[in-house]
Amino acid sequence: MNTVGHLINGRIINDAARLQDVYNPSTGEVSKQVALAAKTTVEQAIAAAEAAFPEWRNTPPIKRARIMFRFKELLEQNAERIAQMIGEEHGKIAHDALGELQRGIENVEYACGAPELLKGEHSKNVGPNIDSWSEFQPLGVVAGITPFNFPAMVPLWMFPMAIVCGNCFVLKPSERDPSSTLFIAQLLQEAGLPDGVMNVVNGDKEAVDTLLGDPRVQAVSFVGSTPIAEYIYKTANANGKRCQALGGAKNHAIVMPDADMDNAVNQLLGAAFGSSGERCMALSVAVAVGDAAADTLIEKMQAAMQSLKVGAYSDKSNDFGPVITKAHQQKVVGYIDSAEAQGATIVVDGRNPQVAGHENGFFVGGTLIDRVSPDMLSYKEEIFGPVLQVVRVDSMQAAMDLIDAHEYGNGTCIFTRDGEAARYFSDNIKVGMVGINVPLPVPVAYHSFGGWKRSLFGDLHAYGPDAVRFYTKRKTVTQRWPSAGVRESVSFSMPTMK
Ligand code: NAD
C-alpha cells in the first residue's frame, strides 16, 4: 500500500514509525497510509528551514517572485491531477476541487507581486539632512497547520506569501487527505525553490506540538476547528510566537420578505450543500424574516432539493460528494436526530441517502430543517455537513441580534432588494465577512480573509495585504549624513521638528 511521506530539505522522506489510514470517502475503503512524523522528523524539517533562511532572506524579491510565476504555471498544468487527488481523499467533485485550486492559485498570483508589496515606506527630510524609512524583514522559520476541507487552497493561503516575503516554511497538512498538499509542495520545488525553503511534515498532535514548542519557529498560521485554534493560539503565544488561528463557523443568511426568492434559493443551494457543507463559509442557517418569507423559502427549497445529486467524486454530474469520514457522517446524522428530538421539523431528510454502487461511502444527503430555535444543539454547534436549518424571526433586527449572539462570526449574507437595509446590515453586523446577495463572501486574494469572535484568534487576517504584515517584521531606520566638518550640538531634550 502507498505511503504518503514528508518533504524535507527537497527530498521525500518516509518516517514509518507510525502510520494512519487514508480513506476514499466515496467508497469507504482505505486507499493509502500517511506517515505521522515523530518529533525528531519535525525537528529535521525545522533545521532544514533554518539552514536555508540566510540565503533565501537575501534573495532579491524579484527572483523569489519568478519562482512563484513558474509555480503558478505548474499548478495550472497539473490542475486535473490535483483535483483527482482531492477527489480521492476528500470526496470533492472535480468542478468543486478545481474551484478550490483556482482560488489557491489566485494567492500565488498575488504573491508574484512581492517586489511591489515589500517596497516599504520612505520619508525624506524628517529632520535636517535626516531621512527615515520602514522596511519589512522576514521572520525566519514559520509554520502552517491546515484542515482537511481545503487541502489545496488553505495551504496556498499561507506558504506562497510567507516564502515570497523571505521566510522558510514548515507545513503540517491535514492527515486525512495529505496527497494533494504534498504534491503541490513538490511542484513548488520543481519551480526552482532552493532545498529547505519549503518543507512538509505530515502528522498529528505530536507534529503540531513540536512546531509550537520549538524556539526556532517564529510564527504559526493555523486554520481548523475552534477548540484547536484556541489551543494553538494560546500555546504559540505562551511560547512567544506570533500566531493567527482561524477557527470554525456558523454562517447565517438573512432572507428578507422583499428578496428575489428564486435567486435566494439558488444561492442557498450551492452555499449550503456545495462541498457537502464542509466549508467554513458554508451557509448553514437561513433566518427568514416573517412567516410568509419562511413559508415561501421552505416550499421553494424543498422543490429545488428534489434534484440535488449526492454521489461519488468521480461522477462529475454530482452536485456534492461524501463527508470526510465515517465518524463525521455519524456526527452529522446525530445533529439531525437531535434537531428532530428537540422539536424542529425535518422537511428534507438526508440521513439515509441511496448511492447505487457506493453503499459504503460516507454520504449524507441534502437536509432541510424548519422551525429551528437558538437553544437547539444543532443551532449552537457547527455541523459541517449538507444541512440547512431555517430559523423564523419577525424582524430584521431580531435576525441581526441572533447572528450577533452566536459564538462564531465568520461569514454572513443578506438577501434583499432594499439598499438601506443592506447598508445597515453590513455596517453593524458583528461578523468578519459579509455578503449582500452574495452567499459565499470569501474575499479575493488581494483582500484578506478572517472572521470575528471565536472564528479567529489573533489580529491579522489570512492572505492578501495582512499576510505581508503577518509574515514580516517592520524595521524603521533613521539616517543622517552630516556634511564634512559639521558638528551637531549636544541636546538632552527629545528631538522634535518644532
Ligand atoms: P481540526 O481542527 O480537526 O484540524 C486542523 C489541523 O489541526 C489538522 O492539521 C490537525 O492535524 C490538527 N489537529 C487536530 N487536533 C489537534 C490537536 N488536538 N492538537 C494539535 N493539532 C491538532 O479541523 P478539521 O476537521 O481538519 O477542519 C474542519 C474545521 O476547520 C471546521 O471547524 C472549519 O470551520 C474549520 N475551517 C476554518 C476555516 C477558516 O478560515 N476559518 C477554513 C477552513 C476550515
Image (cartoon, helix red, strand yellow):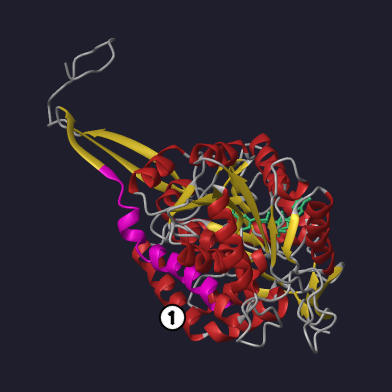
Q: Which of 119 and 383 is in front in this view?
A: 383
In this rendering, position of residue 100 left or right of residue 137: right
Q: In which quarter of the image is ligand 1?
A: bottom right
Please give the name of the residue rendered at 70% of the width and 40% of the height, measured from the top-left corner.
235
Q: In which quarter of the image is the N terminus?
A: bottom right
Residue under the point 74% across and 56% down: 345
Q: Mark 1 packing: few (<14 Cα in 10 Å), some, or many (20+)?
A: some
SS majority, magenta: helix
Where residue 353 appears, as percent x and y from the top left, is 78, 76
Residue 114 is a magenta residue: yes
453 or 22, which is in the foreground? Answer: 453
Amino acid at dot 1? Glu
- Which percent across, then down, holds residue 239? 67, 37
Compared with residue 324, is residue 253 higher up or lower down, i.e. above or below? above
488 relative to 478 in the view: left or right: left
Q: Is residue 319 above or below residue 161?
A: below
Q: Which residue: 65% across, 64% down?
A: 277
Question: Where 490 sits versus 439, above or below?
Answer: above
For the view shown, which residue lies furthest in the front direction? 292
According to the picture, the residue beneath numbered tag 1 turns out to be 73
- Counting every numbered tag in the picture gives 1
Image position, residue 420 (x, y; %): 34, 43
Q: Specify the quadrant of the image occupied by residue 424.
A: top left
State the extent of the magenta-drawn residues as a range. 97-121
Q: Quadrant of the C terminus?
A: top left
Q: Nearest the camera: 271 or 490?
A: 271
Name the foreground residue: 108 vs 6: 108
The answer to whether residue 361 is magenta is: no
